[in-house]
Amino acid sequence: MHMLKVKVLSYDGYKADERPRVFELGSIGYEVRKVLDRWYEPGGAYFKVRASDGNIYILKNSFEKGWSLVAFRQERTN
């Protein structure tokens, strides 16, 4: 699976990189409006988020390799 590296500013609460707050793809920045889901695996954490553009992104924080974009879904606007 190919994953795209992203720059992420995260909220550091109880632990470091607790959840993403802002991320950047290329030169475009997105604010995380809502964390819809999160799950963990050995060595990493996934966050399904709704961003400021209204779309859904799945971001992975690999504890060894950093943040990457795993999936994207464009939400329909009617």
Image (cartoon, grey):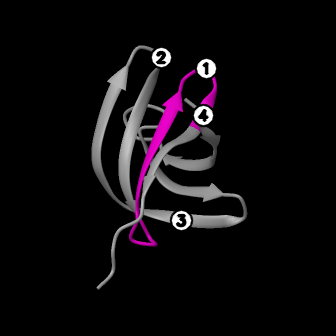
Dot 3 amino acid type: Tyr
The first of marks 1 and 3 along the sequence is 3
Dot 2 amino acid type: Gly
Of circles 4 and 3, the one toward us is 4
For the residues labelled 2 and 1, say whether their Cβ atoms are less than 8 Å apart: yes
Residue bearing the label numbered 3: 30
Dot 4 amino acid type: His
Residue 46: x and y, percent? 40, 35
Residue bearing the label numbered 1: 64
Q: Is residue 28 above or below residue 40?
A: below
Tell me if mark 4 has few (under 14), some (14-19) or many (20+) residues whose alpha carbon lies within 10 angstroms of its own.
few
Residue bearing the label numbered 4: 2
Q: CA distance from mark 4 to mark 1?
A: 17 Å
The first of marks 4 and 1 along the sequence is 4
Of circles 2 and 4, the one toward us is 4
Dot 1 amino acid type: Glu
Q: CA distance from mark 4 to mark 3?
A: 21 Å
Residue 6: x and y, percent? 63, 47
Say left or right for 49 vs 4: left
Residue span colored magenta? 51-67
